[in-house]
Image (tube, rainbow, N blue to C red):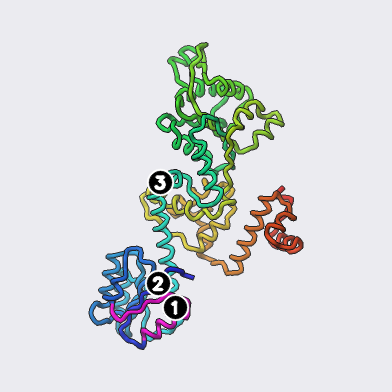
Amino acid sequence: MFDGLKVLLVEDDPTVREGSEQALQLAGLDVLAFHSAELAYKLLTPDFPGIVVSDVRLPGMSGLELLQAVKTLDANLPVILVTGHGDITMAVHAMRTGAYDFIEKPYSSEQLVDVILRALETRRLTLEVHSLRRQLEDGGGIESRLLGNSVAMRDIRRLILDVADEPADVLIYGDTGTGKEMVARCLHDFSHRRKHNFVAVNCGAIPESIFESEVFGHEPGAFTGAAKRQVGKIEHADQGTFFLDEIESLPLSLQVKLLRVLQERYIERLGSNVPTPVDVRVIAAAKLDLEDLSQQQKFRSDLYYRLNLIVLHLPPLRERREDIPILFEHFVLAAAARYNRAAPVVSSAQMRNLMAHSWPGNVRELRNIADRFVLGIAGGASSLLAAGLASPLSLAEQVNGFERALIEQELRAYSGNVSEVSAVLGLPKQTLYHKMQKYNLVAEEFR
């Protein structure tokens, strides 16, 4: 349950110490028992993997002195104090100064185990946050830019490093919010072009009437209001990278002009007949399949084939749920620094809700929820995270949620082919159909 976490038990009464130690061991906990606070303290370090349970009245260092020493060493390490009948006022004061909780003698085994389990859960979450923070702060290279330990993200990182220095243009596919621009920036930053400009253009955000002027530049007098020469975005990206986001939204008339730049590697500013050579690496990103659009004559096929050299596919967040914890922690820490607020700790119940969410907005939606979590703003984010506190999921609900997510993932991977999913999961087809009916999963919706 709490593998690797220890309970340091300090009690000078041998009978109480042995009884408490046995109760905790029967609960499956790893216990180290001591008769003095001095011996227990020698084992403590910052980020100690465990908690401390100590009697208040001890020979030598008292429980209160041990509490003060522990808080100086690691302010987040939970310390539970065990008090006698007449020590309640003192114990309440100790809690105000940092004790996690206190237990009054005589106590039952159930009471002791219950308090310790809560403290261990708190410690587990704290250590997990610290570990993620170190990973984010100390992680070098592309792993600190494109976070995630899923197979898909490892493959993406490896492919980026493999092709970063290639001269060929790149096409990135991915749903809204999957991080296409971040991947483009990594392709730039890990290439020999990183000392030059990375210039991004959203093809759907620039009006067609000014697109040529913005992208190709213009000379003085090229049109009304053109008082001086303007260097276009492609020229500004010379020796660097030119990123075209949402390229599927580029009008056909402009696709022709872009194709010419890709083929000839020069531009002509509006109002000029003089070609200007440009050395740019072009990266395009799309949400829709450009081949399908070209077959529908909504996208030029020659431009598609010109771009379709190196292709990267970014998976939606729902297909790499194992990356959600580290991504969320990263966004929470970033938001806390940006808003100058303390970074709240997400509970295991809240994390289960995050893991179960469908994430239609992908990583961008997760980042927004992290911001709202740090700010404490009510709404979609808060309701998603608060639900875990209001109604913790039972074991059966967690198992059902995992089973549904797994079946949904395989149905998506095999385009709704029930026979293939049945074979992959090792389930009889009839059983699979029964579970799909139970979770309202329809094969046709994945085709």
Give the image location of residue 215, x and y in percent.
Answer: 51, 23
Give the image location of residue 158, x and y in percent.
Answer: 51, 43
Q: Nearer the viewer, residue 122 or 422?
A: 422
Q: Nearer the viewer, residue 39 or 17?
A: 39
* Real-space Cα separation, disc 3 to disc 1, in angstroms: 41 Å
| Mark with earlier residue (3, 1) | 1
- Magenta segment boundaries in residue numbering: 16-36
Residue indicated by mark 1? 113
| Mark with earlier residue (2, 1) | 2
> Mark 3, residues whose alpha carbon is within 10 Å: few (<14), some, or many (≥20)?
few
**Identity of the amino acid at label 3?**
Gly
Q: Is residue 217 above or below residue 182?
A: above
Seen from this angle, which residue lies furthest left?
A: 60
17 in the magenta segment: yes
Q: Is residue 226 above or below residue 299?
A: above
Q: Any mark on residue 6, and which?
A: 2
Residue indicated by mark 3? 140
SS type, badge 2: strand
Q: Is residue 392 above or below residue 178?
A: below
Q: Residue at x 57, y 55 (%)?
A: 357
